[in-house]
Amino acid sequence: MPMEPADLPIVDVDVPASWPCPLAGLVGELADDARRSGHAPEYYQDLDLLSHEDSVLTHL
């Protein structure tokens, strides 16, 4: 049965506090990996999230 829009969590990409825990954890891990690799923080918006889309969507 498809979910009604009212059943979906509200996630504001600009408000990390609204992110589901799996998403926040994934973004945090990717940012930590980027930082350890020496990437400048201004490029963190280019993190590869697309390859993790299925994993994130299963936790929403």
Image (cartoon, helix red, strand yellow):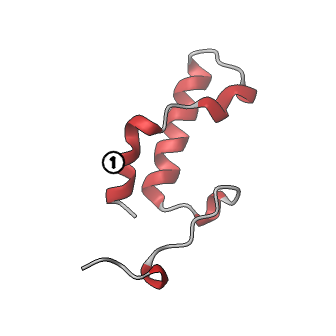
Residue 58: quadrant of the picture? bottom left
**Number of numbered discs on residues:** 1
Q: Residue 42 versus residue 51: which sits nearer the camera?
A: 51
Q: Amino acid at mark 1?
A: Asp
Mark 1 Cα-neighbour bin, 10 Å: few <14, some 14–19, many ≥20: few
| Residue visible at 48% across and 84% down in the picture | 6
Residue 39, compared with residue 52, is above or below; it is: above
Residue 59, compared with residue 2, is above or below; it is: above
Residue 34: quadrant of the picture? top right
What SS does tag 1 mark? helix
> Where residue 7 appears, x then y in whole percent?
43, 82
**Which part of the image, by quadrant, shows the C terminus?**
bottom left
> Where residue 1 appears, x then y in whole percent?
24, 80
Q: Is residue 22 left or right of residue 32?
A: left
- Furthest-top residue in this view: 38
Q: Residue 59 versus residue 4: which sits nearer the camera?
A: 4
Residue 38: quadrant of the picture? top right
| Residue visible at 42% across and 54% down in the picture | 22
| Residue visible at 48% across and 48% down in the picture | 25
Residue 2, compared with residue 24, is above or below; it is: below
| Residue visible at 48% across and 62% down in the picture | 20
- Reading the image, the residue beneath label 1 is 54
Residue 16, compared with residue 48, is above or below; it is: below
> Where residue 53 appears, x then y in whole percent?
40, 45
> Where residue 10 appears, x then y in whole percent?
56, 72
- Furthest-right residue in this view: 42
